[in-house]
Image: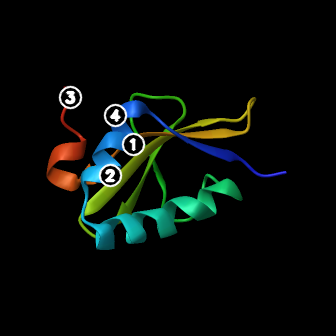
């Protein structure tokens, strides 16, 4: 059984604001996380036990893996110059 993909409210809002072409590319990168959330090319973020990121050109997808619930929780999506900034 695979993982479920869930977006935070902030990540869903920022995803919808992106151009359609970028949304398609990001969705194509997010979809395989259902089968394996620790894909080759994903990198664990420092300072967190279960946060990872994947790169899609100049865009990033930050997510947490909740193994006990089989959930991949998308925290943030956006351009690399903006996605790592704390709010």
Disc 4: which residue: 10
Q: Residue 16 carries which label?
A: 2
User: Farthest right residue?
Assistant: 1
* Towards the viewer: 29 or 47: 29
Disc 3: which residue: 86
Image depth: mark 2 or mark 3 in front: 2
Circle 2 — which element?
A: helix
Image depth: mark 1 or mark 3 in front: 1
Label 2 to label 3: alpha-carbon separation: 20 Å
Q: Disc 1 vs disc 2: Cβ atoms closer than 8 Å?
A: yes
The structure residue drawn at horizontal position 45% and vertical position 29%, both measured from the top left corner, is 48
* Label 4 vs 2, first from the N-terminus: 4
Residue 68: % across, % down: 75, 29
Q: Disc 1 vs disc 4: Cβ atoms closer than 8 Å?
A: yes
Q: How crowded is mark 2: few (under 14 residues within 10 Å), some or many (20 or more)?
A: few
Label 4 to label 2: alpha-carbon separation: 10 Å
């Amino acid at each position: 059984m695979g993982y479920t993909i869930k977006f935070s409210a902030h990540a869903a809002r920022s995803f919808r604001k992106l151009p359609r072409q970028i949304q398609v590319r990001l969705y194509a990168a997010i979809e395989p996380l259902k089968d394996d959330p620790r894909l080759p090319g994903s990198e664990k973020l420092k300072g967190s036990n279960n946060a990872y990121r994947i790169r899609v050109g100049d865009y990033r997808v930050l997510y947490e893996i909740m193994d006990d619930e089989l959930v991949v929780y998308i925290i943030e999506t956006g351009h690399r110059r903006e996605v790592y900034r704390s709010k």
